[in-house]
Amino acid sequence: MPSRLFLSVFFSALSLLSVHAAELNVLAAASLSDALKEIAKIYEPASGDKLVFNLAASSTLARQIKEGAPADIFFSADEAKMDELAKAGLIEVDSRRSLLSNTLVIVVSIEGGAAISTPADLTKPAVSRIALAEPQTVPAGIYAKEYLQKAGLWKKISDKIVPTENVRACLAAVESGNVDAGIVYKTDALISKKVKVASEVAVTEGPKISYPLAVMKAAKNAEAAHRLATYLASAEARAVFAKYGFLPAP
């Protein structure tokens, strides 16, 4: 739980800095959905600002920003998408910071899920459909492919892969039983009551997962956006992220 003393001091400072409430467009990776919505319940009434979330695959969000979609803050699930926006001159470089990390897990449906206990079990004939977030563009899928290649499994199972729009769509495919297994972030597996973790990828064996955040140069209310960015990096906000299974930045 956030410290009441911290929030009191933090938002007292905010009130001195801002007379008018701001509406902030926060474009964030789908895997951050639940944690950010909980943070919004704390932040909005205390700050007076309204957070409007656009939650999707980081690749989709980066493309939208390039095409001119309104954005005050971008919270990506990988550094590559943030690099693209930086090269395009769309972010305030000094505001960029890596806040969180995550781990990958193999999940199966609780009801009638495939018998999987190790990643190598994905090669078994009984496992015919494996969901991944789109492995060419979406961070969760890119991370999963990187891990599978490192483990020597990618070529053995590539014809079984069912690409999905984002990591939450991957999770939904497993929950519905439309696939035999899927690879998602641990944080996504923790919020589902319909899947179970069959195998967890150790941090030392998996890819380096990093969630960077930055304020956009085109932010309509840069001052408010910087305040939100500062709060998201605070110990209190990090406690909420930790509650949902996120790790400190690598």
Image (cartoon, helix red, strand yellow):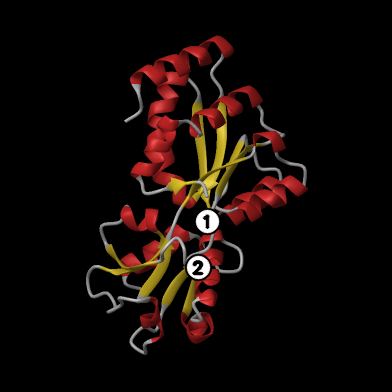
Q: Could you tell me which residue is drawn at 52 percent across and 16 percent down?
A: 14
Residue 11's spot in the image, x, y percent? Answer: 46, 17
Q: Is residue 85 left or right of residue 237?
A: right
Residue sitting farthest toward the left:
111
Disc 2 to disc 1, how far (Cα)? Answer: 11 Å
Q: Return the disc, 2 or 1, that comes first in the chain's sequence.
A: 2
Disc 2 crowd, CA 10 A, few/some/many (<14, 14-19, 20+) = many
Amino acid type for the residue under numbered disc 2 = Ala
| Residue that carries the numbered disc 2 in the rendered image | 144
Q: Could you tell me which residue is drawn at 44 percent across and 60 percent down?
A: 203
Q: Could you tell me which residue is drawn at 43 percent across and 32 percent down?
A: 235
Residue 202's spot in the image, x, y percent? Answer: 41, 64
Amino acid type for the residue under numbered disc 1 = Ile
Q: Could you tell me which residue is drawn at 63 percent across and 22 percent down?
A: 223
Tell me the number on the disc at residue 209.
1
Residue 193's spot in the image, x, y percent? Answer: 25, 57
Q: Is residue 19 left or right of residue 239?
A: right
Q: Secondary structure at mark 1?
A: loop
The N terminus lies in quadrant: top left
Q: Quadrant of residue 194?
A: bottom left
Q: Quadrant of residue 201?
A: bottom left
Q: Is residue 221 visible?
A: no
For residue 21, above or below residue 38? above
Q: Is residue 45 left or right of residue 68?
A: left
Q: Is residue 137 visible?
A: yes
